[in-house]
Amino acid sequence: MVKKSVIAVIVVAGVLFAYFYFASDEAKIRREFKNISKWASRERNDSKIETAARVNQIRALFDDECRFASETYGFDRTYTRQDISSRTFSMMSQNLETELNFYDLSVDVAGDGTARATATADFIVTRMNGERILDTHEIDCRMIKKEGEWLFKEIVLVQILER
Amino acid sequence: MAITEKIKGFRLFKPVLRIVVIALAAYIVFSYIVIPLKIRGNSMEPTYRDGGFNFCLRLRYLFSEPSRHDVVTVEFAGRRVMLLKRVVGLEGETVSFKDGVLHVNGKPVDEPYVKLPCKWNLPPRTVEKDHLYLVGDNRMVPMYTHDFGQTHQRRIIGAPLW
């Protein structure tokens, strides 16, 4: 009986190892979007320590420098990991709740260690006064593979409606 | 004996086949013909209210082009999330707002669906080729908070069913 249990544990561990080790680049990128969505979502009872821990995990998904651009809002800047984490923390902790979801994610991996991902990012923020703000954008991301990890290098908000 | 078994087998297979056909038909209908929509946000109020339910009729513009005053659905990266907006300007036209009144090619346009007061002022702009100018019905909100403008026609994927 013990022998069978040990074999079962080894098989499960082997399957998990194979899943994480041999997962395709596309699967890895999809998992990163899932993780960002999970970590960028904050519930009203979450402490600042929990928020800081989540932001730390988000920070690791970005390259040393990442470009953010939006024609709609007229900005085009490059931020360091430190900038990204401090801004994300400030945004998350200054609001009662935050929720980020990605839909219709499409990933195109190039052979040179770069990838392009497009998705609809749906961001819902509940302010301290209870006001709910919905912000939806199509995003076009450039990613780069470093030491086996896919990192965000560029995030552009696609302009759907041009005034 | 063999025939009896075959009939028995078909009888067992029939309900399974029926379920498969119904599921397949439902998938095709609700993915490609009428996509269920939950309306979120107030940019189309009072025509479409926050929390309302509708369907996006994908075939609406199969044989015709969107025209002024039509409400259309606009896709982002895909069809899971869509924008609901009203067509106010067609390609080549000049669109502007003067004290809340829509002007197309310099002439005021009557918009009976706009029930809420509007004070927008927007200088004239020309709608590019293959584009449509879209605005929500709720113009009571400040102009800078409202998503509107021209978009390429390929992003129009249908219209609400009602």
Image (spheres, rainbow, N blue to C red):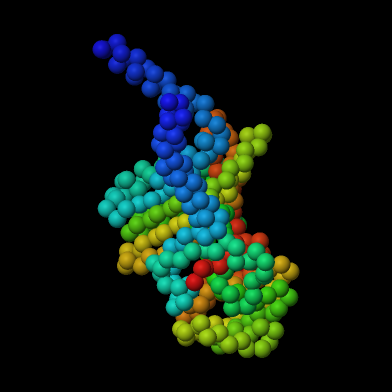
Residue found 45% across the figure and 26% down from its top:
B2
Which residue is the extreme one toward the top? A3
Residue B30 location in percent, x, y? 50, 55
**Is residue A82 in view?**
no
Residue found 56% across the figure and 72% down from its top:
B71
The relative height of residue B115 versus residue A48 in the rendered view (above or below) is below
Lateral position of residue B14 relative to residue B155, left or right? left
Residue B102 location in percent, x, y? 60, 84
The relative height of residue B88 versus residue A71 in the rendered view (above or below) is below
Residue found 42% across the figure and 20% down from its top:
A14
Residue nearest the viewer, comparing A38 with A79: A38
The relative height of residue B143 versus residue A25 in the rendered view (above or below) is below
Residue B57 location in percent, x, y? 55, 64
Residue B3 location in percent, x, y? 46, 29
Residue nearest the viewer, comparing B107 with B80: B80
**Is residue B128 in view?**
yes
The C terminus of chain A: image quadrant: bottom right
The N terminus of chain A: image quadrant: top left
Quarter location, residue B97: bottom right
Quarter location, residue A76: bottom right
